[in-house]
């Protein structure tokens, strides 16, 4: 750290923050069914996804999609592969495994210190103790009965709160309200009947995610390109 200016440290912190913010970008991209090369996907799955010896398959494939989606958005990001990407490794160095994209994508198979920072942030944000996180890390993504990860929508906590009732909280399957899959806005803050916001078929759910993905890319492009030279300013836009 000797000789590093305050701006250098702010840039470094911004890069770590971006890795944390984008670690689950693959969930978004996979649900939007972005176009990917099958061989490349298989390669990324073996690199970033935990392997279950009992059963012989990989879990948490969204981590592979995080790496693939990173390639899509990389031209719209500040410099993430050049020489000055501290604390991450530059692309053409022996420490390339400690690149920014690897830190974001290896949150289920962390090995290096920087990869563990993102994995730990994922764990803390989810409220996991170490033992529970290890169990979660070996399990597959699940959603409530009758819904897939394409068709399930965010539930509202308010339906589960009744200070005048002595009954236990309702089961997730009995909840009737949820949020639409829309960009954050005043209107989207209000829940609606789950039957109105949850598609009844996977392809319809995927189409909603695809629309949101296109909106996401367009919004990224609207961040002034001149601001990519200023990490903290760009991150504020993001």
Image (tube, rainbow, N blue to C red):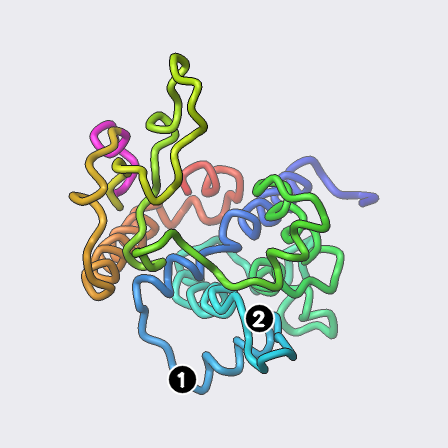
* Rendered image: mark on residue 38: 1
Residue positioned most to the top: 164
Residues rendered magenta in the picture: 182-189
On screen, residue 174 above or below 107: above
Q: Nearer the viewer, mark 2 or mark 1?
A: 2
Quarter-of-image position of residue 143: bottom left
Badge 2 or badge 1: first in the primary sequence: 1
- Which residue: 34% across, 50% down? 220
For the residue pair 231 and 192, the one nearer the viewer reads as 192
Q: CA distance from mark 2 to mark 1?
A: 15 Å
Kindly report the secondary structure that dominates the magenta region of the rendered protein: loop
Pointer 2 residue:
49
- Find the residue positioned furthest to the left: 196
Where is residue 195? Give x, y as percent: 18, 44
Mark 2 surroundings within 10 Å by alpha-carbon count, few (fewer than 14), some (14 through 19), many (20 or more): many
Task: Please tell me which residue is depicted at 38% across the width and 12% down the height of the picture.
Answer: 164
Q: Secondary structure at mark 2?
A: loop
Residue at 40% x, 47% y: name it: 226
Q: Is 237 drawn above or below residue 59 in the view shown? A: above
Q: Position of residue 177 (x, y in %)?
A: 26, 36
Taking 159 as reference, is 135 left or right?
Answer: right
- Residue 85, placed above or below residue 30: above
188 is within the stretch colored magenta:
yes
> Which of the 4 image quarters holds residue 3?
top right
Q: Secondary structure at mark 1?
A: helix
Cβ atoms at labels 2 and 1 below 8 Å apart: no
Q: Residues within 10 Å of mark 1 (few under 14, many from 20)?
A: few
Instruction: Locate the C terminus and report the quarter of the image it occupies.
Output: top left
**In the displayed structure, does residue 205 sit left or right of residue 17?**
left
Q: Is 26 positioned to the left or the right of 83 in the image?
A: left
């Amino acid at each position: 750290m000797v000789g590093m200016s305050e701006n250098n440290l702010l840039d470094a912190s911004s890069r770590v923050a971006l890795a944390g913010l984008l670690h689950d970008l693959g969930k978004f991209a996979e649900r939007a069914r972005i176009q990917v090369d099958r061989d490349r996907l298989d390669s990324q799955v073996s690199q970033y996804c935990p392997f279950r010896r009992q059963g012989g398959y990989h879990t948490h494939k969204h981590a592979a999609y995080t790496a693939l989606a990173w390639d899509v958005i990389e031209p719209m990001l500040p410099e993430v592969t050049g020489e000055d990407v501290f604390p991450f490794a530059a692309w053409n160095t022996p420490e390339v495994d400690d690149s920014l994209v690897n830190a974001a994508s290896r949150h289920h198979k962390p090995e290096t210190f920087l990869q563990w920072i993102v994995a730990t942030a994922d764990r803390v944000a989810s409220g996991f103790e170490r033992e529970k996180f290890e169990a979660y890390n070996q399990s597959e993504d699940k959603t409530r009965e009758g819904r897939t990860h394409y068709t399930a929508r965010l539930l509202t906590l308010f339906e589960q709160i009744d200070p005048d009732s002595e009954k236990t909280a309702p089961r997730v399957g009995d909840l009737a309200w949820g949020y639409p899959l829309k960009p954050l806005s005043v209107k989207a803050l209000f829940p609606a009947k789950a039957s109105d916001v949850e598609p009844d078929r996977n392809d319809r759910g995927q189409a909603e995610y695809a629309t949101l993905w296109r909106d996401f890319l367009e919004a990224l492009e609207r961040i002034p390109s001149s601001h990519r030279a200023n990490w903290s300013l760009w991150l504020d836009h993001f």
